[in-house]
Amino acid sequence: MLTLFRWLLRLTVVLIAFLVLAALLAWYFAVRSLPDYGASYRMEGLSAPVEIVRSTENVPHVFGQSDADMFFALGVAHAQDRLFQMTVLRRAAQGRLSEIVGARAFGSDNLARRLELYRTASASLEAQDSDTRAALDAYAAGVNQWIAEVNQNALGRGAPEFFLVPGQISYWQPEDSLAILKLFAAASSNAATEEVLRARLSLAAPEHGTEVLDGASLPGLPAYATLFPGTRLGPPRAQVAPDQSRDPLAFLRPGQGLGANGFAAASDRTAVGGALLANDPHVPLTVPSLYYLARLQLSSGGVIGATIPGIPAILSGRNPRLAWGITPAPVDDADLFIEELQPGNSARYRGRNGWTEFQTRQEVIRVLDGQDQSITLRRTENGPLVPGFDPGLPDITPAGHVAALNWTGLSDTDRTMSALIGLMRAPDTQSASSALAKVVAPALTVTLADEDGVRQITAGAMPRRAEDHPTGGALPTPGWLDSTGWQGAEPVTTDISPSDGILIATEERDAPALRRTRLGRLLQDREVHSRDSFIATQLDTVSPAARALLPPVGADLWFTGEPAAPGTPERQRQDALNLLAEWDGEMSEHLPEPLIYAAWMRALQDRLIRDELGPLADDITMLQPGFIDAVFRNRDGAARWCDIVQSAPVEDCTTIARQALDRAILDLTERFGPNVTSWRWGDAHQARHLHPGLGDLPALGWIVNLTQSVSGGDFTIAVSGLLGGGAEPFEAATGAGYRGVYDLADPDSSVFITSTGQSGHPFSRHYDDLAGLWRRGEYIGMSLDPELARAAALGVTRLIPAEE
């Protein structure tokens, strides 16, 4: 027995030593991929030496002698800090994520192939202007030189994540950057996914189901079943993830819909006589953030702001004379078409001139540790077939039919990249307007400011629909009708120069446009603005939805009845109502009122719609304020939603509101205890920044993910979008991946921030060093002064032409 014990002890010691050695080796090889920001590198493709000066926060300031060398160095900087992110974005656009993560990415790869993201990006390369082609070539060369440096000097494969995925890192191509921009465009639009939801609502409740999404029935919109007689919702499906924007495999997902705020004030509306502009694009919360801060010293002048790694352009930022911010334009740029298959011959479909052969090609999706999958890509005259585009698509596709998608981003001559490169060089709003004329997808509302004023350009392509189109693009339509096909696409031509000196842009297409209304009120309430007032506006967390909904919903519940006994459900309800009655709508993480309000509205919406929509109610995860407001104001008879169809009595809205509040309080009590005043919004509203690729792995997620409580909500200006379903419905799923405020009176006092940090390396101190500032509403400086950048530099990387 003693001998056995000794051998077990020895084995345990050896095992511990082995684990320690393995951990040290893993740490050593991972740390080798941390870039040395003070090193010098000889690289091919440079015309002259370049310096990359890293500020204290690791923002690269690039100095050199030619624009080509600037884009080359930006490629190096992106690859140094975000090579794995760039690889994930490129593979997501190519439809090749399954090669490194296995079958769990097959669905997203299948969709990317069918949307032809990479094919159309490659075809668009020839359409770019010469300056953009040169920038793309130089940028790709810089990325590739860093990849070569990693390979030649065994620099930990460039990022620790690459130790966990197979294969070599492919060299960068110019079309890769265009493909990521296509992916960004596909993610910006949710027009087609809204069509699917609207059609499902119409099938579930033909008379008024679409009111849930639109707040009121759209005039002249037919019931979906009249377009396709006999179509009915299928049996309940296994519930999908409550919000697919939390896809753990990608930074961007086609159809998810991105947002942003952009607002500006002309010099006569500011305290110091220079225009102000603010921008904060909203994206899924990931770590690292989608955005990366950078500064380039171009021949046209310095330019600084937010980039997306893989794209050689400042998407939101400023140069010495011009500031700009982008917002996805609220245009309907996509349509779904239901195509009829020829009976007995699924290779043909019903076209406008009779039965027609599909355009067909085969592709193979390679799957790690699985069998390669061959897929057949088919195209109609309306666009590619897109099975899997939306989980609800099978519900609205009749038997013997398939769905095709037409989208402005399918263009083979998309020059949006040329527009973005030209925008960086524009000295004024007029030049910027000329550059933006090249935008196709995504359609953008670009807010501009220069010394002469502020201006707003909506740029992009818009489909031309026939005047007798049966749905106006609001529902999927029969693909064989002459009235439903697109009659080409035309540029969006909106150009606004406001007389009052104030400009506002949001992506909202819904009737309430709550954030836009709140922004307008805050900006017009002051005669003059300062940088600090713009920062305060950008960080505003007052919910206009709460202010709009609580008065009508609680109209007959406030201060009713004698005080109930402490500890009873009735007392909890009274305490909750008393808090809400005095609340100003501030969605502070430190208050109980936002949690009570959010839980109440969630329970109320579910109670209003579930009896009529059935299992479809599970997919209405986002609050619909326009719908609830219409119900409680009985707009066009919308109070009918308060009556539970299956019950004999006729319920009124006050009863439903009280029952929903009781349900919400019961749920919150189970989670946070019975003391209503001790609840805190931040306890439930946690911003969980997921690492695409590794964030859903139990052993690694706690290392690479980042979680912090935040203020705000779905409809606050400082957006903090709720997950909406599942075990954590109040988790923050989206937010401002970047915030910037540009002050043209004192440009170097401009400020910006991203939601995590500059580095994508989990062992870097710059992996999450900006996250705390972002959460607290703080910023870092945005100066184009070279001396300031050098004075606080944490390192200077020198790139030297190989032939020197």
Image (cartoon, grey):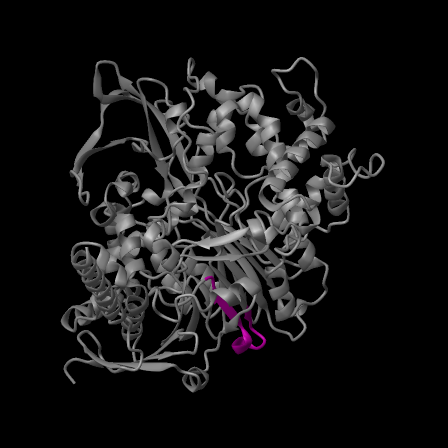
Q: Give the percent coordinates (x, y) of residue 497.
A: 59, 58
| Magenta stretch: includes residue 625 | no
Quadrant for residue 449, please give it.
bottom right
Q: Is residue 320 above or below residue 706?
A: below
Q: Give the percent coordinates (x, y) of residue 454.
A: 57, 63
Q: Give the percent coordinates (x, y) of residue 765.
A: 39, 71
Q: Is residue 282 above or below residue 779?
A: above
Quadrant for residue 28, please give it.
bottom left
Q: Is residue 430 above or below residue 730?
A: below
Quarter holding the N terminus is bottom left
| Residue displayed at 47% across by 35% down | 194
Judge from the rendering whether residue 546 lies leftward or rightward of residue 492; answer left or right. right
Query: Which residues, given as a range, are shown in magenta?
Result: 742-755
Residue 218 visible in the picture? no
Judge from the rendering whether residue 585 lies leftward or rightward of residue 413; answer left or right. right
Residue 288 visible in the picture? yes
